[in-house]
Structures are given as C-alpha cells and as structure tokens.
C-alpha cells in the first residue's frame, strides 16, 4: 500500500466571510487564515476569482514577517498579519461579483 504523503494534512486554509453582499462603492475585506502544522519558511499565497480569471494578487510570505497592505492593482491591496492574509477591494463595482479563492502553496 502506498504511504500517504505526510505534508497533505500539514496545511489548512480557511476563508472568511464565506459570503458577503456588497453595494457599489463599498470596500470589501476578504480574509484567509493559514494554519501550518510544521515550521515553514516560505508560502506562496494567491487570490483568484472564479475559474479562468487568472491570479488577482500573489505574493510570497514568511512565517513571522507581517506585510503591510501593498497594491496588486489600483483597487486591490493584500496584507499579511500572520497567520492571516487580507485582500481588500476598494470601490467595489458590479463586475467584481463572483467567487474569490485564497490559494496557498507551501514552498520547499
């Protein structure tokens, strides 16, 4: 029998809020909490929207180094306050509607 890959359960990601209703012009903050079972040195964090829209915002993160909000675009900002990453969307528009996914990769 194959041995299960040990890192498979080493990384847990949870998002909040699960669903949010926004009015045009609002600012929205989407949270992504990253829980890693073992010590780590580098994570790649990406926010993607729906399928096929590509990566909205991406960065590499270190476990104990907060990152103040930096712009990914004029309206999108990403911040890292371990263990939580926050994507802020300023001045929401109708075409911002959709499903946003926080994708985390443990780099080795």
Image: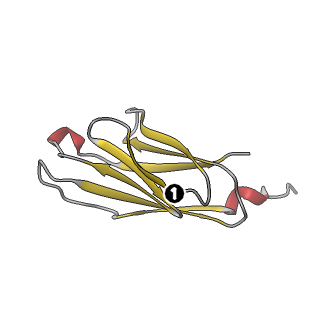
Left or right side of 95 for 72: right
* Residue 23 on image: x %, y %: 12, 53
Q: Residue at x 31, y 42 (%)?
A: 76
Left or right side of 20 for 50: right
Left or right side of 40 for 28: left
Q: Which is nearer the eye, 8 or 27? A: 27
Q: Residue at x 73, y 57 (%)?
A: 7
Q: Give neighbour class at mark 1: few <14, some 14-19, many 20+ (Cα, 10 Å).
A: some
Q: The C terminus appears in which quarter of the rendering?
A: top right
Q: Residue at x 60, y 60 (%)?
A: 64
Quadrant housing residue 49 = top left
Q: How many discs mark residues in the rendered view?
A: 1
Write down the residue under mark 1.
66
Q: Residue furthest left?
A: 24
Q: Which is nearer the eye, 36 or 80? A: 80
* Residue 97 on image: x %, y %: 23, 45
Colour scheme of this structure image? secondary structure
Q: The N terminus appears in which quarter of the rendering?
A: bottom right
Q: Is residue 20 above or below residue 45?
A: below
* Residue 19 on image: x %, y %: 29, 61
Q: Residue at x 11, y 48 (%)?
A: 24
Left or right side of 98 for 60: right
Q: Is residue 33 above or below residue 55?
A: below
Q: Secondary structure at mark 1?
A: loop
* Residue 5 on image: x %, y %: 78, 55
Q: Which is nearer the eye, 77 or 14? A: 77
Q: Is residue 55 above or below residue 85?
A: above
């Amino acid at each position: 029998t194959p041995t299960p890959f040990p890192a498979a359960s080493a990384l847990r990601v949870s998002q909040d809020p699960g669903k949010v209703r926004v009015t045009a012009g609002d600012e929205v903050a989407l949270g992504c909490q990253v829980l890693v079972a073992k010590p780590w040195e580098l994570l790649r964090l990406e926010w993607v929207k729906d399928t096929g829209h590509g990566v909205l915002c991406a960065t590499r993160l270190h476990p104990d180094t907060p990152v103040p909000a930096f712009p990914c675009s004029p309206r999108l900002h990403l911040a890292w306050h371990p263990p939580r990453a926050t994507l802020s969307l300023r001045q929401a528009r109708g075409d911002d509607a959709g499903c946003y996914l926080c994708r985390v990769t443990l780099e080795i």
